[in-house]
Image (cartoon, helix red, strand yellow):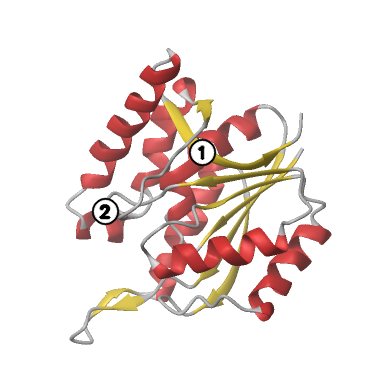
Amino acid sequence: MNILGIGAHFDDLDLGCSGTLLKHIAAGDKVTMLVITDSAYRNPDGEEIRAKDIAWEEGKKAAQLIGAELICLNLSTFEVPFNESLTKQLQKHIDELKIDTIYSHWDGDLHRDHSMAAKCALMAGRHIPRFLMYRSNYYETGSPFNGNFYSDISEFMDKKLEVIKTHKSELERVNHAWLDFFEKQNANHGSIIGVNYAECFKIVRYLV
């Protein structure tokens, strides 16, 4: 299988579905991680919070740890558009990589970059037989994420946490809260299906 994970920022795929990407690698599938922005940003006062080169190095380490190829489109953070230009870029990679399974942001996400990335991915991947949406944030969104597809990542949870730890700059910003939050979230999802850890997705379509 040829798997494409689409994220707006370098940490999104790692938080939302890296356990499942690791599972695909272990099964012998080819995994490509496509990140739309350079993930650099400043606070409202103009202070640099995450530099472009640091974000790239952290993202590269995460992809290497997963065993995936990494592509970055280098758009500006907070400016992900919902337009034909981005859709065509995504579709170009989907076609060239012969993708048959896509993991993308949930289109109901409150973060504009996430929701715009999801909408462009939905359009670009409209003919892909397996399309699943993940949630990568840890805040309330106003509408529920009604996940209905579960991936058992019990044997990959420890490595998922290692992958998340590669994003040192963002982990320091959130006081390492991601590690505890996503471990508990994946444990909760696992308890629903009777395993130790699971990632939950919303199905757009899934051909079997």
Q: Is residue 34 above or below residue 136?
A: below
On the image, numbered disc 1 is attached to which residue? 201
Taking the spot 46% from the left edge, 60% from the top edge, the residue there is 10
Chain-order first, disc 2 or disc 1: 2
Left/right placement of residue 195 relative to residue 180 reads: right
**Residue 61 in the image: x percent, y percent?**
48, 52
In the image shown, does 67 or 79 lie closer to the viewer? 79
In the rendered view, tell whether residue 1 sits above or below residue 134: above
| Quarter of the figure with residue 174 | bottom left
Residue 169 left/right relative to 6? left
Q: Nearer the viewer, mark 2 or mark 1?
A: 1
Element at label 2: helix
Residue assigned mark 2: 171
Considering depth in this image, is 160 or 54 the residue closer to the camera? 160
Q: Secondary structure at mark 1?
A: strand
Which amino acid is tagged 1?
Phe
Give the residue drawn at x 36%, y 62%.
110
User: Is 161 situated left or right of 45 in this image?
Assistant: right
Q: Residue shown at 45%/17% (left/top)?
A: 193
Q: Residue 3 lies in what quarter of the image?
A: top right
Q: Amino acid at mark 2?
A: Leu
